[in-house]
Amino acid sequence: IVNEILNDPEFDKPGVRVILVYPMNALANDQLNFRVAPLLGKVLSEYSITFGRYTGQTQKNVRRSEVIAEMLSNVKLDEEVQGDIHDNWLVTREEMLKNPPKVLITNYAMLEHLLLLPVNAPLFLDCKLKALVLDEVHTYNGAQATEVAMLLRKLKNRIGVNYPVQYFATSASLGSSFESEIKLKIFASNLFGESEPEVIRGNRITHSEITTKQDSNYT
């Protein structure tokens, strides 16, 4: 996803490019602070890929400096960012409505809220969506899955998606049988409203160097 953003021929033009959707604020905060921010706010800070979390916890009518001071009171976060919150990390509602982040982090309930209220309309101005991620997708089932599926269709209709977009449904809880493969594809197709989804799996393998060191500890 980051590679796609960096190679965007319209990188300098405004608008959201990626939406990361989490089922809970706690997960959104954790991934923002210890996954997204270290990558975009430190390792790739020179490229100024703007990002921000827009949830019910995102403050409004407050100074950026006040929010940052509150953020850095979290010792773990302060250590992670080494006391430095770069300008490309947008932390207030006003910042994001004025200059929509390239990477928007939210939850599905807030995404519904953002699409409904006119005050949030600036967030989707000039939106050129390239990718959307639903994390912990196994938490969406039954009526909730239907709700999220309709929400994604509303989003695509709202921003006028009539071009290819990459949709990712991520989970560490997937069945591995042939039957599961078929069901997963049907589920993904119904959820995103897209045809021919692909299931990509990954297996965690211990590196040989780690294995060697572990073995040496027991000899």
Image (tube, grey):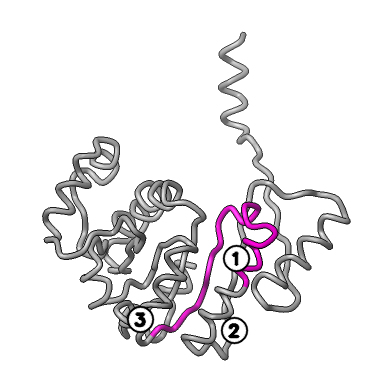
Question: Of label 3 and label 2, which has the lower sequence position?
Answer: 3
The relative height of residue 189 versus residue 136 in the rendered view (above or below) is below
Q: Residue 207: give x, y in percent of width and height.
A: 61, 36
Membership of 54 in magenta stretch: no
74 vs 134, left or right, is: left
* Residue 70 versus residue 115 in the image, above or below: above
| Residue hosting label 2 | 164
On the image, numbered disc 3 is attached to which residue?
Answer: 15
- Look at the numbered disc 2 and give the secondary structure of its residue: loop
**Amino acid type at image mark 3:** Gly
Which residue is depicted at the point 43% across and 77% down?
115
**Image-based side of 64 in relation to 141, left or right:** left
Query: What is the span of residues highlighted in magenta in the rendered image?
Result: 127-149
User: Could you say which quadrant of the image residue 135 lies in?
Assistant: bottom right
Q: Is residue 161 left or right of residue 49?
A: right
Q: Position of residue 130 (x, y in %)?
A: 50, 78
Q: Which residue is pictured at 73% across the width and 78% down the height?
A: 195
Labelled pair 3, 1 in contact (Cβ < 8 Å): no
Of the 4 image quadrants, the one containing the C terminus is top right
- Look at 36% across and 78% down and name the residue there: 117
Instruction: Identify which residue, 219 or 17, lies in the foreground.
Output: 17
| Residue that extends furthest to the top in the rendered view of this protein | 219
Look at label 1 and name its amino acid. Answer: Phe
